[in-house]
Amino acid sequence: MTLRVVSERTEWFTIGKYTVLRFVPPFRLSALFSLFHRLLKSGSGHQVKLRLSIGYVHLTKRYRMTTLIVFCARFLFVSSFLCFGAVMYKSDNPQRKALMLRAILVALLSIALAKGLGAVYYEPRPFVVQHIQPLVPHEPDSGFPSDHTLLVFACAFLLVPFSRPAALITLLIGSAVGTARVLSHLHSPLDIGASIVFALLANVVAAFLIRLPAQPDR
């Protein structure tokens, strides 16, 4: 088998009596005509077989995975607010008041931990260290901790005593967000782990300071 690379998006090679062309879309129509012209001038007499699908399928799978990672890294954290709102809506007035007070305290404690320890410890973002382009554009500042992951896990731990199904869903959302932030080269696993620990500490303190109302006997 003889391989001849014509350009970065097209290549052609011979297998037996066939000359196989492979394209990686997108490609220009002029490149296609140029390839046919070169084959005709070569006078090899080989039959031409086009394979447009292989490169396209690989490119499509990679594009879809990248799109999913970017979506989870940038926008998925918003769904944690929906879980919080659903629990708020289904709770009675005493439970709703306790949930709101805990949420405010958890938010303040999480911000204090993130900003305080983030100012003391500097962790460069992976795309800065590796000199690569991140999937999500971002300033080359400190990545410690991950604010997106901190927010979702703080919400997940907050919902545990109020609705375990909603808390489990939010934990899964947080896992997806943290994983996507790492795959996007925005954060290291250390940033994600620190965010989870900060969210847990904030909820432990809030649970100690704000007690849940007693459930009425039924």
Image: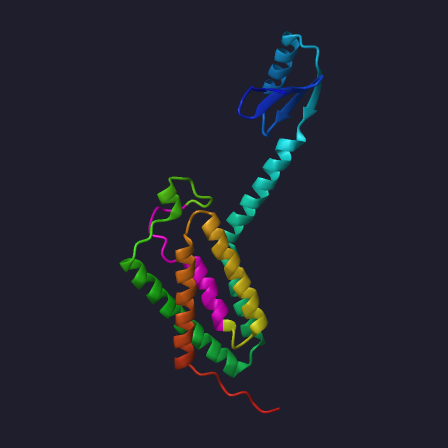
* Extent of the magenta region: 138-158
Q: Position of residue 101 (x, y in %)?
A: 43, 76
Q: Position of residue 212 (x, y in %)?
A: 48, 83
Whether the magenta-drawn stretch holds residue 153 is answered as yes
Whether the magenta-drawn stretch holds residue 152 is answered as yes
Q: Is residue 35 left or right of residue 45?
A: left
Q: Is residue 217 above or below residue 169?
A: below
Q: Is residue 188 left or right of residue 171?
A: left
Q: Is residue 82 visible?
A: no
The residue under the point 41% across, 66% down is 197
Q: Is residue 87 above or below residue 195?
A: below
Q: Is residue 22 visible?
A: yes
The residue under the point 47% across, 79% down is 98
**Picture quadrant where residue 9 is located:** top right
- In the image, 26 versus 191, the foreground residue is 191
The C terminus lies in which quarter of the figure? bottom right
The residue under the point 51% across, 54% down is 75
Q: Position of residue 95 (x, y in %)?
A: 51, 81
Q: Is residue 138 above or below residue 23?
A: below
The N terminus lies in which quarter of the figure? top right
- In the image, 165 versus 49, the foreground residue is 49
Give the mark count.
0
Q: Position of residue 16 (x, y in %)?
A: 70, 18
**Picture quadrant where residue 133 is located:** top left
Residue with the most extreme left position: 120
The residue under the point 42% across, 60% down is 193
**Picture quadrant where residue 65 is located:** top right
Tell me the colour scheme of the image.
rainbow
